[in-house]
C-alpha cells in the first residue's frame, strides 16, 4: 500500500493567483509612480504652502532617501515579521502616509509624511517580486518576472504623466489621495490572499549596521538630490554630507564584513557575477530614470505636449517591454546565455539614446518619438530578467535573496546618481550653448539684424510703437536663443545616457556562466 502523501503545492491557482498578482504589481507600480509624480507639482505645492522651491525639493528628496534606506533592509525585516504581515503592514503605512501627505498644511509636515510614505513604499517594491514568484508555479515564473519587470519600467515613466494630469485637472493633493482607495483595496486583498510565512529567528539584531546604512546611503542620496541646487562642493552642507556618507559607507562595509548576522551580507560581492550584475543594475537604473527625467520635460516644455499626449506615446513601448521579459525568461530556461540577451538589450537602449539625440528638435512630432520609444521598450525588455539571471547564476539559498535585495537598491541608486549627473550636465551645457549663441546676436551679424528688424516690423503691424516693437523683438530673439540652448543640452543629455551605458556594458564579458546553466529565477526577489 502506497502511504506517500503528496506535498501541498506552495503556489496559487485560479482566481486567487491573479488577485494576488494584481495586488502586488499594483502596489509596486504605485510606489514607483510616487518616485516621480511630485516632480511636476513642485511649483503648485510651493505656492499653496507658502514655501520656496528649494524647500519644496525636500518633498522629493525625503521620499528618495527613505526608499533607498529601506530596500536593502526588507529581507531582514521580512524575516522578523513574516512576509505577509510585513507586506500588508507596508501597504497600510504607505496608504496612511499618502493621505496625510495630501492633507498636509505646511511644507515640513509634507516632507515628514513623504519620508514615512517612502518607508512603506520601498518595502512594497522589494517584497512584491518575492510574493509573485511564490504565487506562480515553477513553469510560469517567467510570467511573474515579466509582469514585475514591466512594472519596474512603467512606474517611473508614468509618474510625471499621471502627476501632470492630476495637477491640470484637480489639485496637488490628489497626487497623494489617488493612492488611498487603491491602498485600502490592496490592504484587504493582501491580508486575505497572500500566503503567510512564519517569522524567522535572525539572531542578535545588527543595530550598528542599520545606523551606518542610514548615515551612509541616506547621506549619499541626499547629496545627489541636493548637490546641483546647492552648487555642489561650493556648499558647506554638501561637503559635510560627503564626509558623512563616505564615512558611513566605509563603516557599514567594515561592520557587515565582520558581524555574524549582518543586516546586508556584503560577502556576496566575492562572487564576480554579483559584481558585474550590480554594475549593470546601476546602468539600468541610469537608463530608466534619466529617460524619465529628460523625455517628459523635453516634449512638454519645448514641444508643447500635454500629459495625456506624453503618456499615450510611452504606453506601447512599456507593453512591449512586459511581453519581451516573459520571452527572455523562457530563453534563459532553454540555455540561452544571459550575456547575449544583456548585450542585445543594452545595445538597443544605446541605439535609442543616439537616435533620440538626432530627433530631439523643435519640429519633431509623435512619429519622431514613437519608434525610438519602441526601440527603448525593446531594449528594456532584454535587460531586467537576463541581468537577474546573470547576477544569480551559481548562487544558492539566502545568497540569492541577498543578491536580489542589493540589485534593487543599486538600481534606484543608479537612477539617483544618473539624475544628479544629468541635471548638472544639462545645466552646464545650457550655459555653454547660450553663451555661444548669444554672441551671434549682434549689429555686425547681417542675419541677426535681418531677423531683428523683421520682428520689429511684425510687432509694429500689430499696433506697437517703435520702442515697444524693438523691446519685444529683442526679448523674442533672446527667448529663442534660450529655448534652442535648452534643446541642444537636453539632446546631448540623451546621448550622454547612451555613452554611460556603452562604457558599463563591456563588464558583462567578465561574468562567468557555465555552459548549460539554468538560473532559478523563481528564487529571486
Image: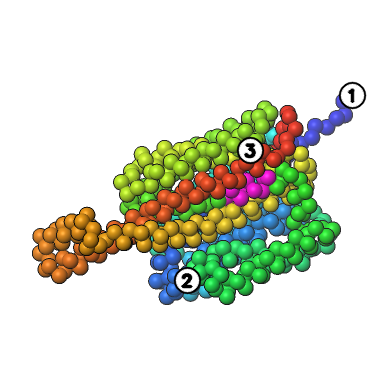
Question: Distance between the Cα atoms at labels 2 and 1?
Answer: 76 Å
Left or right of 368, for residue 343: right
Specify few, some or many for label 1: CA neighbours under 10 Å numbering under 14, 14-19, or 20 or more.
few
Q: Say which residue appears at 65% left-offset and 40% top-offset.
A: 508
Q: Horizontal and vertical percent for residue 293?
A: 47, 54
Please say if 189 is above or below 53.
Answer: above
Q: Is residue 203 left or right of residue 224?
A: right
**Residue 453 point in image, percent of width and height:** 16, 60
Residue beneath disc 3: 386
Closest to the observer: 382 or 169?
382
Magenta residues (range): 276-285
Question: Which residue is found at the position 70% from the left and 63% from the top?
Answer: 249
Res 8 → quadrant: top right
| Left or right of residue 200: residue 454 | left
State which tag comes first along the sequence, 2 or 1: 1
Q: Main secondary structure of the magenta part?
A: helix
Please tell me whether residue 241 is drawn above or below residue 363 in the rendered image: below
Q: Which disc is residue 148 wearing? A: none
Crowding at mark 3 (Cα within 10 Å: few <14, some 14-19, many 20+): many
Q: Secondary structure at mark 2?
A: helix
State the residue in front, 199 or 427.
427
Q: Percent position (x, y) of residue 281?
A: 62, 47
Residue 24 makes an appearance in the image: no
Label 2 belongs to which residue? 54
Q: Nearer the viewer, residue 137 or 237?
A: 237
Q: Secondary structure at mark 1?
A: loop
Number of the front mark, 2 or 1: 2
Q: Nearer the viewer, residue 504 or 519?
A: 504
To which residue does mark 1 refer?
A: 1
Amino acid at each position: 500500500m502506497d502511504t506517500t502523501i503528496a506535498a501541498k503545492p506552495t503556489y496559487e491557482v485560479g482566481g486567487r493567483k491573479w488577485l494576488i498578482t494584481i495586488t502586488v504589481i499594483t502596489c509596486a507600480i504605485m510606489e514607483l509612480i510616487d518616485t516621480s509624480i511630485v516632480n511636476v507639482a513642485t511649483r503648485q505645492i510651493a505656492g499653496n504652502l507658502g514655501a520656496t522651491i528649494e524647500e519644496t525639493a525636500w518633498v522629493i528628496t525625503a521620499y528618495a532617501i527613505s526608499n533607498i534606506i529601506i530596500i536593502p533592509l526588507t529581507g531582514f525585516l521580512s524575516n522578523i515579521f513574516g512576509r505577509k504581515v510585513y507586506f500588508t503592514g507596508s501597504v497600510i503605512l504607505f496608504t496612511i502616509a499618502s493621505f496625510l501627505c495630501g492633507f498636509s498644511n505646511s511644507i515640513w509636515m509634507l516632507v515628514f509624511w513623504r519620508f514615512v510614505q517612502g518607508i512603506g513604499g520601498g518595502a512594497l517594491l522589494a517584497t512584491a517580486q518575492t510574493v509573485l514568484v511564490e504565487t506562480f508555479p515553477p513553469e510560469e515564473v517567467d510570467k511573474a518576472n515579466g509582469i514585475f519587470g514591466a512594472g519596474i519600467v512603467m512606474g517611473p515613466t508614468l509618474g510625471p504623466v499621471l502627476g501632470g494630469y492630476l495637477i491640470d485637472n484637480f489639485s496637488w493633493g490628489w497626487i497623494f489621495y489617488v493612492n488611498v482607495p487603491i491602498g485600502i483595496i490592496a490592504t484587504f486583498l493582501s491580508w486575505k490572499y497572500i500566503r503567510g510565512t512564519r517569522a524567522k529567528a535572525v539572531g542578535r539584531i545588527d543595530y550598528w549596521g542599520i545606523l551606518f546604512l542610514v548615515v551612509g546611503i541616506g547621506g549619499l542620496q541626499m547629496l545627489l538630490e541636493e548637490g546641483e541646487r546647492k552648487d555642489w562642493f561650493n556648499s558647506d552642507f554638501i561637503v559635510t554630507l560627503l564626509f558623512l556618507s563616505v564615512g558611513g559607507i566605509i563603516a557599514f562595509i567594515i561592520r557587515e564584513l565582520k558581524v555574524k548576522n549582518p543586516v546586508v551580507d556584503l560577502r556576496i560581492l566575492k562572487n564576480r557575477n554579483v559584481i558585474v550584475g550590480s554594475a549593470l543594475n546601476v546602468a539600468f537604473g541610469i537608463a530608466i530614470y534619466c529617460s524619465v527625467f529628460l523625455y517628459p520635460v523635453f516634449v512638454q516644455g519645448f514641444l508643447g505636449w500635454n500629459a495625456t499626449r506624453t503618456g499615450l506615446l510611452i504606453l506601447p513601448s512599456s507593453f512591449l517591454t512586459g511581453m519581451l521579459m516573459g520571452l527572455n525568461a523562457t530563453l534563459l530556461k532553454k540555455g540561452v546565455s544571459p550575456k547575449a540577451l544583456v548585450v542585445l538589450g543594452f545595445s538597443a537602449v544605446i541605439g535609442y539614446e543616439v537616435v533620440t539625440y538626432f530627433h530631439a528638435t523643435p519640429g519633431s512630432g509623435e512619429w519622431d518619438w514613437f519608434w525610438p520609444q519602441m526601440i527603448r521598450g525593446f531594449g528594456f525588455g532584454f535587460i531586467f530578467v537576463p541581468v537577474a539571471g546573470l547576477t544569480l547564476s551559481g548562487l544558492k539559498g539566502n545568497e540569492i535573496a541577498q543578491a536580489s535585495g542589493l540589485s534593487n537598491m543599486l538600481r534606484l541608486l543608479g537612477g539617483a546618481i544618473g539624475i544628479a549627473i544629468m541635471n548638472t550636465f544639462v545645466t552646464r551645457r545650457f550655459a555653454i550653448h547660450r553663451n555661444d549663441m548669444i554672441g551671434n546676436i549682434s549689429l555686425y551679424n547681417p542675419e541677426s539684424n535681418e531677423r531683428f528688424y523683421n520682428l520689429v516690423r511684425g510687432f509694429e503691424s500689430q499696433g506697437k510703437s517703435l520702442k515697444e516693437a524693438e523691446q519685444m523683438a529683442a526679448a523674442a530673439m533672446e527667448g529663442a536663443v534660450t529655448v534652442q540652448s535648452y534643446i541642444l543640452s537636453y539632446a546631448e543629455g540623451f546621448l550622454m545616457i547612451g555613452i554611460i551605458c556603452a562604457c558599463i556594458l563591456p563588464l558583462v564579458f567578465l561574468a562567468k556562466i557555465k555552459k548549460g546553466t539554468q538560473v532559478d529565477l523563481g528564487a529571486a526577489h
